[in-house]
Image (tube, coloured by chain):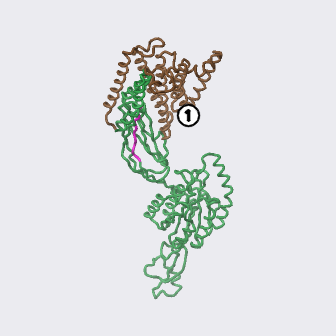
Chain colours: A brown, B green
Amino acid sequence: MSAEKSSPWIAPSVSIGLMVGLAFSWWTFSSNLLFVDMGLHDLLSPLDPLVLTGVGILMFIALLFLILEGRWSVLVIIAGWGLYTPSLLYMSGIDWSYAFGLSVDKYAFYTITSPFLIALNGVVLAASTLLWRQGARLERTARQLLEKGATGPEVSTVMNKAWVLNVTLVLVASITTVGVLLLTGAWSDAVGEILPPPEFQGLLFALLAAVMVLFSLWIYARDPEHS
Amino acid sequence: MTPRRKALTARIAPIAVIMMTGLFLGNMALMIISLVPWFFLAFSIAIPGPRVSRLEGEIKKGAIFVGRDLKVERETTIDHGMGLVVLAESISPTFEQRDGKAIRVLWKGRGVLNAPFNYTIRPMRRGEYDIGNVRSEGIHFSGLFPSDQNVWGSKRSLHVEQMVMRAAEIRDPRLESRMPMPASVMSSHGAQTTNFLDIRRYQRGDQFRSINWKATVRSGDVEALRPLVNEYEREGRRKVWILVDDSERMRVGSEAESAFECALHAARALSDFYLQRNCLVGAALIHQGRCQLPEGGRRQKVMLADMLYRANVKGSSGSLTGFVHGHRGHLRQGNPLFIIISILDRGSQPELRDGLKELRRNSGPKSRFLLIDVDLKNIASRDEVESLGIQLRGLEETTVRGHIKKLGVRVVSWEPREQDLFQVLLTSRAVGGEFGS
């Protein structure tokens, strides 16, 4: 994100999105076995919850301002995905550590977080990353337009409208994804139920993959050869 | 593969990789995550990018004066898609944009968008400019597809010419007489003056009124029918040389309003003024050595205007001395008024001094010299502090002016932004500046 603001709404909304994603990932990570193995649990648990909450809020605000200033947004995205990855890997149906002959044990990433919440965390991270990318693209376009001599208010008005449409579509895409998530049924199960029943798994994956392939074909088919 | 398909593939490929990884690992969460960009892509594709369907309006004028406004009025219709629309006309940086800009950014939402694309341009520098082409760019709101670009209108040339300062408004003859003029030149042809020269015998073709009857009677030669006639001096056409400094130092100021542009402006005005007063006017670009030999009449006016229109700063080669050496044969004829337009400062003083000395040696004894010093104060300064700095530097230049004046050169300082050249010439003369001879 650039320090030059083309629209007053882009930077704040991206910042909030990224911070929500990071906070969610931190929460998911705190329920992971890795959190305990790394000694973070022992380090933080003796502290007063009030102090922890205060420090957390302060860090949240500080990071929010840093992102607003156009800095650290990439680091926040990496941190968010980094904290989320162990729990995501634990969700795999196959034992990848065994399959690839890795020394890392899949069960070292054991988590007590519900699969639904882990998937929801992924949706939030994906949405915030998408927002960040779209915001950066619009900022870049705005900067180019201003360099070409377009007036600030005109560019700002147009960017606001483009941003509103982008945010709306990201939200609609996220809500639709959550809808699909809920439709799978198994995800609404209690803690510990990681995968849908075996008879559904293959069918569900195949269905999703088929939908995506058909969708890709549809995209190419409906797009005429415009140059 | 078209750019659109390339862009689509670039978007779909990473999503497909995530999905395949999820499928391979049997990781439903990863597959679910890949759905977010997938759905975003699907919804984005459902909304096509904007496309301009009409852009009307032409610039009809083919020529314009520097400093004059040219209003451009266009109307556009966008009836397709949603997103950003950029309309831009490539305008030279030497054009000042007023009342709008030559670039417009619009948002095309739902429904048909009709929008004006109006602005006013004011050329600040002479030259030939290409105008008339408007580029439209429809940018998809999500940046999914490459922008839809089009070019509208027909490219045409706009001829921008310097507006000539008119001295014709000097109605007062007393003021007119204060303008620097070349010394009178006697000739065997030309119009008769009232200065008595001699008495001689009547020749065929002499006017009847020029017979001096008293002198004829006194000569006692009446019976031989050979009357005596009065002979008066005949006036030759006066000559003016306008020498423009085209060295690198004349670039000072903005591209649109440099010292060189001001010098050309002055040269054009002065050449017109002297041509109107029946002088033979020649002009030269000192460093390029290009010159138009002194002539009179309308044709010369056009030739001089053309030469000054095409003039450009040359660079560091050449000098006034070199120019004089190269053209001494022409410069020697008559007693011209030499008008040198340059910047007088410590840097230029040695070259000007040597050149003026050489010019004096190679011109007639009654030649007159006028140096118009294009004052940088308002051209080169961007703010008051810089202006003050230049003013302070100007105080140091007083001695420089003194050296030049000692050569019998009248030095006139002209601030192009604030002063009318003719008023400066008239006023400086009135104060007491006199030509050296």
Query: Is residue B260 within the magenta segment?
Result: no
Of residues A189 and A202, the one nearer the viewer is: A202
> Based on the displayed image, in which of its 4 quarters is residue A69 positioned?
top right
Of residues B84 and A33, the one nearer the viewer is: A33
Q: Residue at x 46, y 62 (%)?
A: B301
Q: Which residue is mark 1?
A: A3
Quadrant into which the C terminus of chain B falls: bottom right
User: Is A187 located above or below residue A136 in the figure?
Assistant: above
Mark 1 Cα-neighbour bin, 10 Å: few <14, some 14–19, many ≥20: few
B163 sits left or right of B414 in the view: left
Quadrant into which the N terminus of chain B falls: top left
B396 sits left or right of B285 in the view: right
Q: Which residues are magenta?
A: B131-141
Q: Residue at x 35, y 21 (%)?
A: A207
Instruction: State the image coordinates of residue A225 (x, y, percent, origin top left).
Output: 32, 36
User: Is B241 located above or below residue A185 in the figure?
Assistant: below
Query: Is residue B139 within the magenta segment?
Result: yes
Instruction: State the image coordinates of residue B111 (x, y, percent, origin top left).
Output: 36, 28
> Based on the displayed image, in which of its 4 quarters is residue B354 positioned?
bottom right
Can residue A169 be spotted in the picture?
no
B156 sits left or right of B421 in the view: left
User: Is B351 located above or below residue A165 in the figure?
Assistant: below
Q: Secondary structure at mark 1?
A: loop
Per the picture, the main secondary structure of the magenta-coloured stretch is: strand
Instruction: State the image coordinates of residue B141 (x, y, percent, origin top left).
Output: 42, 31
Tell me the chain of label 1.
A
Of residues B295 and B376, the one nearer the viewer is: B376
